[in-house]
Image (cartoon, rainbow, N blue to C red):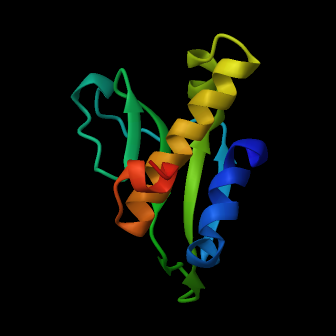
């Protein structure tokens, strides 16, 4: 994950100082049937399975401020990657999309295209 994030962070370091990146095993899904779940724009989805989510900055249960964070879901990502190279590409694409959402930019701008 860190390897996939590095080129993005190098280019956008100043804009990403208040953003954390975390990894969870799987996304939390309510009792609703997964095929009927409508995901928000802050979630990267493949075959209706979340791969990552952008959690905005806010306030926790104790009233303390929290930082914005991208949460990558390890198992769904691993299930979609054929090998290490494919995983690196997938992670990069997901991170580009999430950073673009966080910054309110088009993913092509994040990529520098």
Residue visible at 26% across and 35% down in the picture: 37
| Residue 50 on image: x %, y % | 44, 35
Report the residue that reaches farthest toward the top: 82
Q: Which residue is more in the foreground, 65 or 5?
A: 5
Q: Which residue is more in the foreground, 16 or 46?
A: 16
| Residue 11 on image: x %, y % | 63, 63
Say left or right for 81 vs 60. Answer: right
Q: Does the image show residue 53?
A: no
| Residue 47 on image: x %, y % | 36, 20
Residue visible at 58% across and 51% down in the picture: 71
Number of numbered tags placed on the structure image: 0
Q: Quadrant of residue 78?
A: top right
| Residue 24 on image: x %, y % | 65, 44
Quadrant of the snapshot with the N terminus: top right
Q: Which residue is more in the foreground, 77 or 65?
A: 77
Q: Quadrant of residue 13?
A: bottom right
Residue visible at 60% across and 71% down in the picture: 16
Q: Is residue 4 above or below residue 11?
A: above
Q: Is residue 41 above or below residue 83?
A: below
Q: Is residue 61 above or below residue 5?
A: below
Residue visible at 48% across and 76% down in the picture: 57
Say left or right for 113 vs 83. Answer: left
Q: Does the image show residue 94?
A: yes
Q: Quadrant of residue 75?
A: top right
């Amino acid at each position: 994950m860190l390897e996939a994030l590095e080129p993005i962070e190098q280019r956008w370091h100043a804009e990403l100082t208040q953003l954390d990146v975390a990894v969870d095993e799987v996304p939390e899904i309510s009792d609703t049937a997964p095929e009927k779940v409508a995901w928000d724009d802050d979630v990267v989805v493949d075959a209706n399975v979340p791969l990552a989510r952008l959690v905005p900055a806010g306030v926790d249960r104790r009233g303390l401020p929290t930082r914005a964070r991208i949460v990558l879901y390890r198992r769904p990502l691993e299930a979609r990657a054929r090998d290490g190279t494919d995983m690196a590409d997938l992670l990069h694409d997901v991170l580009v999309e999430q950073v673009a959402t966080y910054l309110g930019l088009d993913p092509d701008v994040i990529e520098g295209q």
